[in-house]
Image (cartoon, helix red, strand yellow):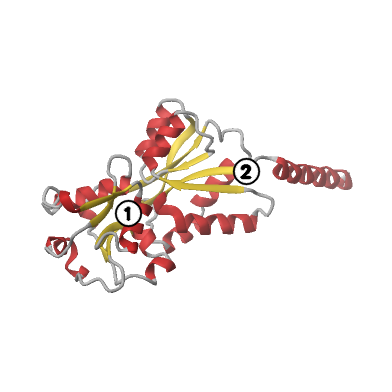
């Protein structure tokens, strides 16, 4: 009897392995602030699930929101806010509920050789020598909204309009600052902590979290991903202790902390 049960178990495990091998790759859309953190999450996930195929796409949360409304083939949607996933679910574009996975932060960032004293915080942006300030476009990037709110809190939004260089997403805004196309940028803390960004930067300055609304980042499983065997498995890993520890390395706070 025991041998029979073991044989059935082995057959089930083999069948599961064959299904994973034949199943299409899991496609995960991630907000641009997750670029380095999610790459690491996926690498560790694949170590635990060698047969799993996971493809990540990075970009603007707002652009992805519009794409998913038009049935874009994304299995999971990790947004830089929770509003977009909640709205998609309300309109029938996914299953389950939107889940918080992280709280993001923004920083003031300049490349090596920059002459600004970022320890002054937001007030340094009044320096007349600044020609260009990079932020993400607040029309469709939650990190751009946070940057705009911080500037408004300090009474600078209107005064700095002529100096703003807006990226399609927060990763592009960071690129503007890193390439010298902008003197300084308001970028994601998670991007500033990436090794390749730290190598080319002056010490950055965290922007007071009270200067903008919290960057409450949420995810959802789309209708397209409802039938994929790895959708829930991957989402659960991101939410696991190990997944949260990786996100923490990139400056993300766990919800509820």
Mark 2 or 1 closer to N-term?
2
Residue positioned most to the top: 91
Q: Where is the C terminus found, in terms of image quarters?
A: bottom left
Picture coordinates of residue 245 (x, y %)? 47, 61
Mark carried by residue 173:
1
Question: Height in image: 181 above or below 88?
Answer: below
Q: Residues within 10 Å of mark 1 (few under 14, many from 20)?
A: many
Q: State which quadrant residue 199 falls in.
A: bottom left
Q: Residue at the location (63% across, 59% down)?
A: 47
Look at mark 2 in the image and give the residue it sits on.
25
Count of numbered circles on the image: 2
Picture coordinates of residue 189 (x, y %)? 34, 60
Q: Is residue 150 left or right of residue 86?
A: left
Picture coordinates of residue 161 (x, y %)? 16, 49
- Element under disc 1: helix
How far apart, in angstroms, are the residues tagged by discs 2 and 1?
30 Å
Picture coordinates of residue 71 (x, y %)? 49, 29
- Element under disc 2: loop
Q: Residue at the location (11% across, 63% down)?
A: 128
2 or 1: mark nearer the eye = 1
Q: Residue at the location (17% across, 61% down)?
A: 122
Q: Nearer the viewer, residue 12 or 15?
A: 15
């Amino acid at each position: 009897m025991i041998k029979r049960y073991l044989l059935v178990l082995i057959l089930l495990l083999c069948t599961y392995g064959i299904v994973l091998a034949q199943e299409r790759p899991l496609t995960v859309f991630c907000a641009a602030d997750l670029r380095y953190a999610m790459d690491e999450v996926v690498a560790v996930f694949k170590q635990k699930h060698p047969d799993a195929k996971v493809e990540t796409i990075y970009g603007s949360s707002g652009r992805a929101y519009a794409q998913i409304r038009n049935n874009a083939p994304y299995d999971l949607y990790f947004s830089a806010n929770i509003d977009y996933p909640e709205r998609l679910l309300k309109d029938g574009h996914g299953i389950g509920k939107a889940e918080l996975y992280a709280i993001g932060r923004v920083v003031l960032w300049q490349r090596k050789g920059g002459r600004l004293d970022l320890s002054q915080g937001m007030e340094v942006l009044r320096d007349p020598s600044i020609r260009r300030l990079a932020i993400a476009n607040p029309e469709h990037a939650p990190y751009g909204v946070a940057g705009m709110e911080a500037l408004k809190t300090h009474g600078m939004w209107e005064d700095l309009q002529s100096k703003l260089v807006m990226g399609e997403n927060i990763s592009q805004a960071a690129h503007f600052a890193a390439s010298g196309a902008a003197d300084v940028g308001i970028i994601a803390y998670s991007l500033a902590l990436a090794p390749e960004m730290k190598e080319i930067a002056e010490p950055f300055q965290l922007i007071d979290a009270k200067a903008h609304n919290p960057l409450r980042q949420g995810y959802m499983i789309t209708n397209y991903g409802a039938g994929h065997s790895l959708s829930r498995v991957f989402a659960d890993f991101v939410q696991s202790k190990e997944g949260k520890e990786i996100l923490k390395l990139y400056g993300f706070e766990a919800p509820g902390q």
